[in-house]
Amino acid sequence: MNEHIVKSYEDELNSLAAECVRMGGLCEAQVADAVTGVVKRNQELAASVVVRDDKLDEAERDIERKTIRLIALRQPVADDLRRAVAAMKVANNLERCGDLAKNIAKRTLVIIESDPLTPLTRSIERMGKLVLGRLSSVLDAYSRSDLERALAVWSQDDEVDEHYNSLFRELLTYMMGDPRTITACAHMLFVAKNLERIGDHATNIAEIVHYEITGAEIIGGRPKTDGLQV
Amino acid sequence: MPDPILVVAGSERHDLTGRRFVFANAAARELLRITAEEGMLLSAIRDPEVLGAVDRALFDLADAEVVYETTGAQSRSLRVRARPLAPAADGARLALLTFHDETEVRRVERTRVDFLANASHELRTPLASLSGFIETLRGHAKDDPAAREKFLGIMQAQADRMARLIADLTSLSRIELDEHVPPRGVVDLAPLVGEVVEAATPLGAQRGVKLDWRPCAACSVSVRGERDQIVQVVQNLLDNAIKYSPDGASVRIEMQSGLTDTAAAGVSTDIIPRLSLVAPDPSSETYAVLRFTDLGPGIARQNLPRLSERFYRVDGQKSAARSGTGLGLAIVKHIMNRHRGGLVVASAEGEGSTFSAYFPVAGAPEAVVKAS
């Protein structure tokens, strides 16, 4: 019912979304490799994450260019406009996730110079898995226009925060116990913070998906737990 | 079950939306969580390496092989092979994608490493204490019958602890190995819980703890699962609740059915935070939930995420007064994950704790009708 008279207009919109999804796949891989890199102390993997970040930057620029072109030439309205804008915003968020993954990888290169902190890396691994699950859920929601799934991601933000807070305390205990671990622990703290930020971007994308599908913003506050969020 | 298979069609290299899957067998639809038999390739799979392999097969007409890891509660690792096929009648290029599951192989390896590390670390303490006492018994406590009795008592306790540890570790690694094998069988939940509660009543009575079991009156609930493992879940959660209850308090065991996953998980309040330790992948299943509530000291929020970690003890609880192995919740977590169920803890210091374990209901449609 929504057939466009000019077929290629629809194609353009579809391929814009498709490019976003492909970029999402790249981003997931970057985050997954960054987490594996820090958990397994894999220098090679971490270095490759740093190098590959360019691809994400390139993809974001490309999507932005195409969106602007499409808006200028086709002057979309209503849900077409929302789709175009959503693509651009999703790409922005993914690019930020990519930067955070790159930052984790850079810190990994420093962390592996000191002795391993085994129980800590377990906590990071758990948090990484959780965040990655959210990212991939929200990208599923975006690529399949699945409102329900997007809302599920949106409403479960507090779990990542709980993990972050728990890790924060764990790190403090380590640093107090043995000052020689401070360098590695301080970097770990940023790794955890970056993961938490990636989780926030997943929430943002969930909001964008909601807007794209319904045209309305999500009403009501997110269930938020207050502890020592910094 | 056959391996997942996808047939992918594509026209031009630059045309992203043109890459579609034109056939997906049931296994592939389950793996990639897609409902249609055809659609845009990117809506089914985004992994850059897999997409690269598809491109090689479609446009370079070359075979390609990559490893693909899925995310989610039950992550799997699969070897993906892409092979070019003869073009379709309409001239579209075709490629065949096969997925071979290698999760088990990797898991066995990792479990073995973990088992050795855990076992050797945790057995060291009681062993050291045993050999210390043997030395003392041979030395200056040789002719002191009172001291000998006391030491032998301690040694007995340490040996028991080692035996419990080994039993828990072996059952944990067995459960881990089966984690990706869906449980067979159907279990009627209420009588099972009734039996476990009955068996635990004397243990509670020893400590003056009453067990308050409330089966839901209207529903007989069958869940998909393996009986022995569900017994273990109920037992471990009940043991914990009894263990941390103050003397003379009661432990409440409730059961509800016909809930969605979010309803089964319950809600967080300002006073009592809640955290899910195991969550099933989103689905439209209905669940039956068991809630175990104690009036114990409760668990501080910052300790919640680490509860199901092996050998994790909340600070200051390392003393032998509570005689656990530190593996009970880890075992529960793995069993719940295998059953595609969930485990949620709601607790705050001084407010007691509630552990909720929820299982997918067998023959879901009728159960919903009954509950509503």
Image (spheres, rainbow, N blue to C red):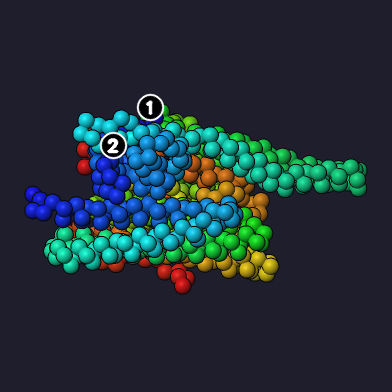
Judge if badges 1 and 2 mark residues of a common chain. Answer: yes
For label 1, the residue is B2
For disc 2, the chain is: B
Residue B51, position in %: x, y?
37, 45
For label 2, the residue is B93
Residue A151, position in %: x, y?
28, 56
User: In the image shown, does B89 or B253 lie closer to the viewer?
Assistant: B89
In the image, residue B159 above or below residue A66? above
Residue drawn where x is 49% and y is 53% of the image: A33
For disc 1, the chain is: B
Quarter in which the C terminus of chain B is drawn? top left
- Marks 1/2: CA distance? 25 Å
Quarter in which the N terminus of chain B is drawn? top left
Q: How many C-alpha atoms fall within 10 Å of the one at disc 2: few (<14), some, or many (≥20)?
A: many
User: In the image shown, does A124 or B240 lie closer to the viewer?
Assistant: A124
Residue drawn where x is 8% and y is 49% of the image: A1
Visible residue check, residue B243: yes
